[in-house]
Image: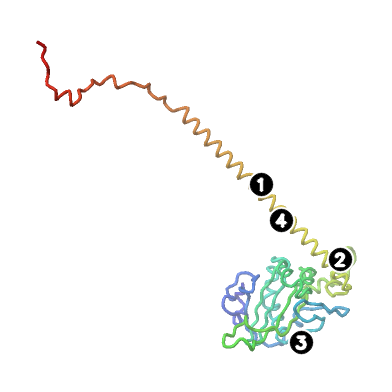
Amino acid sequence: MFAGDAELESILIGQSKTLQSFPRQRRHAIQFRYGNIPAAGNSMQNVGAMFMPLTDQTIHSSTYRDFKNTPCDSWEIELCVGLAVKRIITPQWAHLQSLGRSLAIFKVHKEPPVCELFFMPRDEVIRTYKDKMPKSVEWVHLYQPDIEFAFWAELYQPSKKAGRGKSLLTDELCGGFGSRFGMAEHLRELVRTAEGEGPEAERTLNAIKVATSACSREECERITAQAQAKMDKKRQKKERQKEAKAERRAQQQEAEKQLQAETEAEIIASARAARLPAPPQVDFTRLFIDKPSPERLEKPLQQEG
C-alpha cells in the first residue's frame, strides 16, 4: 500500500509496512515514528484547511471537560496529522472515500514519539463518542466526502502508575483536538464552483457554509439529526430486508424438507409394491414319520400265541 515511498516506509513500524488497506480498528492501526520528522512543511496547517466557526461553541461531554473551538496547541498532533495527510491519506484518497463515512482516529504518544492511526466506521463512532465526544458524531455526519475527512486526535503521556510494564496502552490521555479537514486542492475547486451560478453553485455554497460552520449551532444540530434519521431509516430498511430474506430462506428449507419427506415416502411405497409376494404356507409336519419314543424302543416285543 505504501510501496515506493521510502521516507514513509522508514518511519513505519512492524506490520504497518505491509498493510493492503486502511485499518478500521486500533489493533491493526498504522503506527509510525514522528520524533525525527521536521515540522516545516509537514504541519497540518500547511497541507490543508480547517475553517474556524464564526461563533464560539462549547460542547459538553459525559467523560471529558467541555470542548471549545480553539486552535490546536499540541505540536505533536499538528505534526502527526499533517504528516498523515501528506504521506498517507492524500496518496490513498480514493481508497479512503471507498470506506464510506469514517472518523480518522489519531493516538499520539509523547514518549516514545509514536502515532497510531485507524479509520473508525460511522456506526462505531456513534456508539463510542455519542456522549463522550458528540462533536465527532456531528463531524462524521456532516463532512463533505469529496473534499474533506474528519479526524479526532488524542494526545497521550506515560502514566505514572504504569510501573515497569510500560506500553502504548498504559499511557494516559492529556489532550485532544479534532476537526473536519479540507483537502487544499479540493477546496480550491469547491470555491471556484461556488463562485458560479445555478443550482450547483448554490449547493456548493451551502456546503461551504456547513464546512465553515457559518450556520448556527442549532442549524448544525438540525442537519446532524437529519443525517442520523436518514442513517437510521437506511439501517431499518436493511434489517427488514435481512429479516425477509431469513424468512424466505426458512420457508425454502421447510419446503425442501417436506419435498424430501414426500420423495422418501414414495420410494418406500414403490419398493413395497414391487416386492415379490410371500410363498404359500406348507405344513411340513406331514412329511415326517413319527419316531418311536425311547421307552418304546427298550420294551421287548410281545408275540401272540
Instruction: Find numbered disc 1 in the image and state the secondary structure of the residue it sits on.
Output: helix
Residue of label 1: 248
Tag 2–tag 4 contact (CB < 8 Å): no
**Marks 2/1: CA–CA distance:** 43 Å
Residue lying at the far left of the rendered structure:
305
Q: Nearer the viewer, mark 2 or mark 1?
A: 1
The image's mark for residue 203 is: 2
**Marks 3/2: CA–CA distance:** 34 Å
Query: Which part of the image, by quadrant, shows the N terminus?
Result: bottom right
* Nearer the observer, 10 or 288: 288
Residue shown at the point (71%, 83%) measured from the top left: 77
Tell me the kind of residue under disc 4: Glu
Tell me the kind of residue under disc 1: Arg
How many other residues sit within 10 Å of disc 1, few (<14), some (14-19) or many (≥20)?
A: few
Query: Which part of the image, by quadrant, shows the C terminus?
Result: top left
Q: Nearer the viewer, mark 3 or mark 1?
A: 1
Residue of label 3: 73
* Nearer the observer, 1 or 165: 165
How many other residues sit within 10 Å of disc 4, few (<14), some (14-19) or many (≥20)?
A: few
Q: Position of residue 69 (x, y in %)?
A: 82, 81
Residue of label 4: 239
**Marks 2/4: CA–CA distance:** 32 Å
Q: Position of residue 104 (x, y in %)?
A: 71, 74
In the depicted structure, whether residue 240 falls above or below residue 227 = above
